[in-house]
Image (spheres, rainbow, N blue to C red):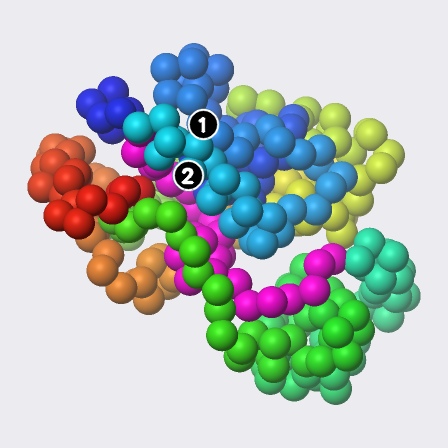
Amino acid sequence: LVRRYPMEIISVDSVMVYKGMDIGSAKPDPETRRSAPHRLLDILDPAKSYSAARFREDAIRSIKDIINLGRVPLLVGGTMLYFRALLLGLSELPSADQAIRDELTHKARKIGWAAMHVWLSELDPVTAAKIHPNDPQRIQRAIEVCLISDTPMSELLSMPRHNTLPCSPLKLALIPGDRELLASRIAKRFHDMIDAGLVDEVRGLFERGDLGPDHPSIRAVGYRQVWAYLDGHLSYDEMIERGVIATRRLAKRQLTWLRSESDLRIFDPYDSACFEKVFSCIGELALLPDGRAMC
């Protein structure tokens, strides 16, 4: 698309933001980035946290920059929460408090995340009912919000959202029609990452000494399983098996999010005419009648 249109890509990926996390995030290689520059790649050290709110700020700033250059923002990626935050806006939630997060992490190591989920059920039963007991990142954030604001996160999220998206989005989704082919390609993709050096990439992070399995970057699919292998909790074969399963589950969640979107134009990536259909769709809507910018 960037070869045919004056477009510039903004990455919508919660792992590609991290420096040194290239193979497991399928980050575009240097040659691709030279011909099609991507914004919001390699902007953060893996020891830092990145949120949907921070992404929204960064993305809107990038969108405005691209529009001011007379170009069209092309947002590409698979982190559905980030897309939702960008399109719908965010309720006013308190910013992260590192001291509280550290306390919660320490407590979780003592009592386990299942017990932390029970605690969340006492603080905010509505939010707890929506979060799986094995989802430490969301459990931690929900408890953190309760402790900082003295208000359940579910109550804060029910308040009106603020949406100031500076363009009108055209939403294009690639949804494979052949699920068996998708499953086999996911398995091949993970094996290809292993062959490309994913274990060594994670080992470099493992040996830094300032990262652990509780960091959001390391909880990413693929990295979490390889980390557990390096930490002696999984065998090599178990690491492969769990990495493939986790990736398939991620794809399933992405498809669920996509199906809940309105005004979505769906294309099958395994259709040989897929690109021409996308190109035709964009061509029809490239000029909006009221002069608004498109993204």
For disc 1, the marked residue is 38
Residue pictured at 64% horizontal, 40% vertical = 223
Left or right: where 101 falls relative to 261: right
- Image quarter (top left, top right, bottom left or bottom right) of the C terminus: top left
- Image quarter (top left, top right, bottom left or bottom right) of the N terminus: top left
2 or 1: tag closer to the N-terminus: 1
Callout 2: few (<14), some (14-19), or many (20+) C-alpha neighbours within 10 Å? many
Left or right: where 172 falls relative to 228: left
Is label 1 in a helix, a strand or a loop?
strand
The quadrant holding residue 135 is bottom right
Asked if the stretch drawn in magenta spans residue 84, the answer is: yes
Q: Is residue 176 above or below residue 260?
A: above
Observer able to see residue 132:
yes
Total marks drawn?
2
The quadrant holding residue 45 is top right
The spot of residue 102 in percent (x, y) is: 86, 56
Asked if the stretch drawn in magenta spans residue 203, the answer is: no
Under mark 2, the amino acid is: Ile
For disc 2, the marked residue is 63
The spot of residue 268 in percent (x, y) is: 20, 45
Is label 2 in a helix, a strand or a loop?
helix
Residue pictured at 53% horizontal, 24% vertical = 195
Tell which of 155 and 13 is nearer to you.
Answer: 155
Bounds of the magenta span? Answer: 71-96
